[in-house]
Amino acid sequence: MWQPTPIEAFVKTRMAELGLSRGELGQRLGHNTNKALRRLDQLMHEGISGHPDFTAHLATALEVPSDALRQTINAQNQAKAKAAKAAYRAAFKPHAIWQTEHSRPTSISMAAWINAPAHLHLSFPTDLAESDYIRFCQDNAPDVIPFFGRITGFTINYQPDHAVVYALDGQILETLDRAPRLPIAGLRL
C-alpha cells in the first residue's frame, strides 16, 4: 500500500491547514509555477530539491520555520540511507575487487562507455568455500583491466564490515573494517 513520504505528509498537512491547492503553493514558491512544483515533487520523493534555496522558499510559502522543514527532510534522508544500508547488507555476497596499477581510469569517458568498473569485480561461485577464495582469485586474475591497467592484487569483501587486501601471491597487505564498493560508470543515451 502506498504511503506518503514524511516530507510529503508534512507539506500536504500544512497545505490543508492553510487551505492551499497545489497550484497556489506553486505560485507562492516562485515565478515559474511548473518548475517550482517539479522541485517540490523531487523534494517530497527524493529528499533533494535541485536548488539550494528551495527549502527556505518552501518554508516561507508554507508559513513554517525553516528548521521544522529541514528536520523533516533530514529524517526522511536518514531513513532512506538506513533502508539502503539494510538492503545492501541483505543482498551482500562475498566477492573480490581487483587492485590495479591505476586507481582511476586513464580515460574516464571510454571507461564509462565499456563500463570498465564492472571488470574490477569478481563473483565467487555460491558453492565455493571461503578457504578457497584466495586461490580462486589467483586462478581467475586477468592480466589487465581496460583503462585501469595491470592487476596488482585483490580485495576480498567477506562481509559488509570485513574485507582483506591481498597481493597477487596471497600475502595479506591490509585488513579493512568495511567492504570497499565499486565505482559506478555508465552513459545516459
Image (tube, rainbow, N blue to C red):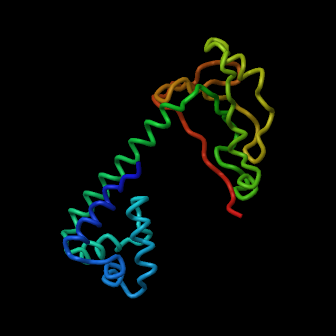
Report x, y in % for residue 71: 25, 57
Q: In the figure, is residue 107 to the left or right of 77?
A: right
Task: Give whichever of 159, 6 is nearer the camera.
Answer: 6
Q: Quadrant of the C terminus?
A: bottom right
Residue at 39% x, 64% y is 43
Image quadrant in which you'd find residue 34: bottom left
Residue at 45% x, 42% y is 84
Q: Is residue 76 above or below residue 142?
A: below
Q: Is residue 72 above or below residue 116?
A: below
Q: How many marks?
A: 0
Task: Give whichever of 153, 46 is nearer the camera.
Answer: 46
Report x, y in % for residue 75: 29, 52
Which residue is most to the front?
Answer: 1
Residue at 38% x, 42% y is 82
Which residue is most to the right?
Answer: 143
Report x, y in % for residue 135: 71, 16
Task: Give whichever of 188, 20 is nearer the camera.
Answer: 20
Image quadrant in which you'd find residue 95: top right
Residue at 59% x, 25% y is 94
Q: Is residue 43 above or below residue 53?
A: above
Image quadrant in which you'd find residue 182: top right
Q: In the figure, is residue 187 to the left or right of 1?
A: right
